[in-house]
Image (spheres, helix red, strand yellow):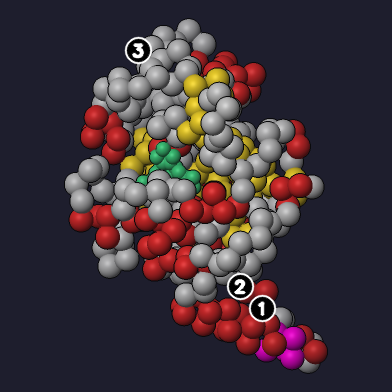
Amino acid sequence: MRFRVRPRHDPLPSEITPLAVYQQRRQLLQAALAGAALGAAGLAPAARAQPVPPVGQALPGKPNPAFSVLDRPTSRRDITTYNNFYEFGTDKGDPARHAGRMEIRPWTVRIEGEVLKPRDFDLDDLLRLAPLEERVYRLRCVEAWSMVIPWIGYPLNHLLRAVQPTGNAKYVTFETAMQPETMPGLRSRIIAWPYLEALRLDEAQHPLTLLAFGLYGEVLPNQNGAPLRLVVPWKYGFKSGKSLVRIRLTEQQPVTSWMRAASNEYGFYANVNPDVDHPRWSQATERRIGEDGFFRPPRRTLMFNGYADQVASLYQGMDLRANY
Ligand SMILES: Nc1nc2c(c(=O)[nH]1)N[C@H]1C(S)=C(S)[C@@H](COP(=O)(O)O)O[C@H]1N2
Ligand SMILES: [Mo]
């Protein structure tokens, strides 16, 4: 498959293994060796207690063609160097430059609110919940550019089912990490921290809504939202929170960070819609990262980012201009 072929390029600063990750790798290796020794002696292999591989290691998922698009995937280099992750700065290159410092082990995600079984999950718990799939999804930014990304993850609904939403649950809020020591962007006031995003419960349960742990067959790079992030492919990218630490189910619709910052520009729904413009620019077309050329016209944006067949029924009877 073409997209498995990695583009050849010099390692970026962000790809040079940070010391902590290197040490973790060594520990893993030692654990694996110890495990092999124990295994030979007939004891439980210790390595099995640590199934979460470090950043940059292989994290294969079974390709799922039913939920993948046929667009040619964006290069791994573009996906990992042209990012929005305001905790590390607002320049597209800031996340690749600075996110390597984010501390991603150990990591816990708390699920709380309107659920019968609230609890904390560590990464190992989460990776054991469901088999990993590879799904090639478009990511369309509200800024009118897009990419095509081979994500590795599983439907968020596996996690929701594990905690059992109560009958009162109507919304799901995603809270992302705040690490003042490693995130210089937290000092700026562009939006309210922590970065909060939310979905209606039925959107969160939709099989396209993915909890992603990797991309291009590898553990998620920090700048793309390690160790786990949301991917909601029919909505503008800002709905897909990175580096999740808390998921809260509520009866009331929450106010998200971007609504608080500018509710006339960033609505709760944020469904990709070529007919509803952002107040400051058109959403009718988009630029696919990596394929700009002088003679190439911009692409026409597709309703629900091309996922209308799967998701349009969620919004039946709703005025999508009022609910932007
Ligand atoms: N925590 C957090 N999550 C975030 C953002 C952010 O600034 N902080 N930016 C969002 C926006 S605007 C987009 S377009 C996507 C970009 O994801 P990518 O950099 O992996 O392509 O992440 C989203 N998730
Ligand atoms: Mo975005």
- Quadrant of ligand 1: it is top left
The amino acid marked with disc number 3 is Ala
Q: Main secondary structure of the magenta part?
A: helix
Q: Label 1 amino acid?
A: Ala
Q: Are marks 1 and 2 in contact (CB under 8 Å)?
A: yes
The secondary structure type at the circle numbered 1 is: helix
How far apart, in angstroms, are the residues tagged by discs 1 and 3? 53 Å
Asked if the magenta segment contains residue 35, the reply would be yes
Label 3: which residue? 322
Q: Please report the residue visible at 68 percent of the width from the left and 56 percent of the height from the top.
A: 6
Secondary structure type for disc 3: loop
| CB of mark 1 near ligand 1 (< 8 Å) | no
- Image height check: is 304 above or below 179? above
Residue at image x 41%, y 26%? Answer: 270
Give, as a single range, the part of the protein colored magenta.
34-38
Mark 1, residue position: 47
Query: How many neighbours does mark 2 have within 10 angstroms: few (below 14), some (14-19), or many (20 or more)?
Result: few
Q: How many marks?
A: 3
Q: Residues within 10 Å of mark 1 (few under 14, many from 20)?
A: some
Residue type at mark 2 is Gln
Residue 11 appears anywhere in the view:
yes
Q: Is residue 19 above or below residue 216?
A: below
Q: Find residue 273 and report its horizontal and vertical position in percent.
A: 47, 19
Compare residues 32 and 220 and report the one nearer the observer.
220
Q: Residues within 10 Å of mark 3 (few under 14, many from 20)?
A: few
